[in-house]
Amino acid sequence: MTAPLRAASAAAVPDLLERAEGPTALAIVPRPAGAAARALLAATLADIAARRAPMRINLIATGPAVDESAIAAAIAYLEHAEAVTGQLIDIG
């Protein structure tokens, strides 16, 4: 798996994932505030993943006090879950 992409905000995710190259793309982004913003991010991710198939595209949303080992565990899971795409994993 290529190194995870880092987005400063949820608003930056669509462009970041649209420009990603290779067989997989994984972005890490701060968790958006509010249920509506999270739902919009999940819907955007699902749309991009469907359009870019067979490329695997996933996203990790992190809280303010996230443990780096939790991020590493999510990355390891996604690295080995070959059929998983379009997933938003919320950590912290």
Image (cartoon, rainbow, N blue to C red):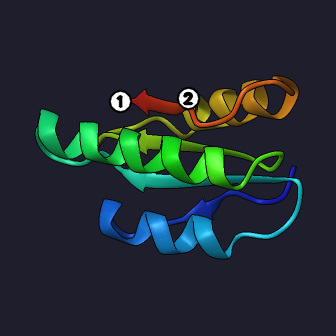
Distance from Cα at disc 1 to Cα at disc 2: 8 Å
Q: Quadrant of residue 78?
A: top right
Q: First in sequence: mark 1 or mark 2?
A: 2
Residue 70 x/y as whole percent: 56, 29
**With 36 as the anchor, is 1 left or right in this view?**
right
What residue is drawn where x is 62% and y is 46%? 49
Residue 20 x/y as whole percent: 71, 70
Work out whether 80 lies above or below 21.
above
**With 31 as the anchor, is 12 left or right in this view?**
right
Residue 55 x/y as whole percent: 80, 50
State yes or no: discs 1 and 2 in contact (Cβ < 8 Å): yes
Q: Which mark is residue 70?
A: 2
Q: Which residue is mark 1?
A: 92
Work out whether 9 lies above or below 56.
below
What residue is drawn where x is 41% and y is 42%? 61
**With 91 as the anchor, is 57 left or right in this view?**
right
Q: Amino acid at mark 2?
A: Ala
